[in-house]
Image (cartoon, rainbow, N blue to C red):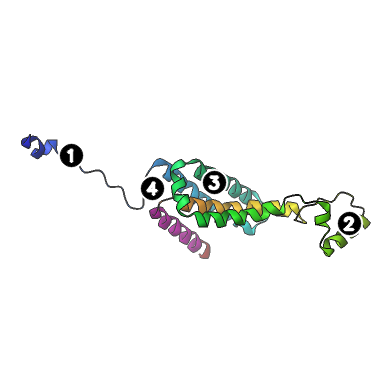
Amino acid sequence: MRFAAAHPSRRRSPPAARPRHAPADARERILFALSGVLLSVTFITGGSSQESGWGVMVAELLALLVLLFVLSQRQWRARLAAARWGVAVACLIVAIPLLQLLPIPAWLWQWPSPRFALQHDLAAAGVTHIDHRWSLAPAATERDLFMLLPGLALFMSALALPREAWRQLLWWFVALVAFSVV
């Protein structure tokens, strides 16, 4: 028995050490790649500083994909729970435009005097149907809600990724900024 343990052919080889910067499994590599692509698309196309365009739409759709991927993976929920205050603040930020899109009763909509004057002016202009929501421009509020998605997706993916991957995403961001300066 002693010979078998000491014999070179019987020794166990040490586990292959993965580089410190590499994500641990395939899901983390996919999330890391999606986050890098989302960061690149958002940075190159102008992100939320642009009101419309194909780049904004691609960034928003990619952000939805990243968010769904993060929230669908069970093992990342523990990491997200560890940063529950950050996730709660992010959810509250997203809740603001959602609350503005909620319908409200007509009496509450008319309660502030400027809104009553606005309704009077709209009636004088011939507008009969008024959308009673907190927001006076629901389409703009919806657009702003969708513009929050890339930032929220990058935040949630950073929380789901291991700390080693954060450094690489940060270096990628620095490279994008340097490219933009040049």
Q: Residues within 10 Å of mark 3 (few under 14, many from 20)?
A: many
| Alpha carbons under labels 2 and 4: distance apart | 57 Å
Residue at which label 4 appears: 23
| Alpha carbons under labels 3 and 1: distance apart | 41 Å
Q: Residues within 10 Å of mark 2 (few under 14, many from 20)?
A: some
Secondary structure, mark 1, is loop
Residue at which label 2 appears: 122
Instruction: Name the residue at 61% across, 50% down.
Output: 55
**Left or right: 156 as drawn, with respect to 145:** left
Residue 7: x percent and y percent?
9, 37
Quadrant containing the N terminus in the rendered view:
top left
**Left or right: 139 as drawn, with respect to 30:** right
Q: If you read the primary sequence from the N terminus, does the residue marked by circle 4 or circle 1 appear first? A: 1
Give yes or no for residue 172 being in the magenta stretch. yes
Q: If you read the primary sequence from the N terminus, does the residue marked by circle 4 or circle 3 appear first? A: 4
Quick check: marks 3 and 1 in contact, CB under 8 Å? no
Image height check: is 19 above or below 179?
Answer: above
Residue at which label 1 appears: 12
Q: Nearer the viewer, mark 4 or mark 3?
A: 3
Q: Amino acid at mark 3?
A: Leu
Residue at which label 3 appears: 67
- Stretch of the chain drawn in magenta: 163-179
| Alpha carbons under labels 4 and 1: distance apart | 25 Å
Q: Nearer the viewer, residue 43 or 119?
A: 119
Residue 72: x percent and y percent?
50, 41
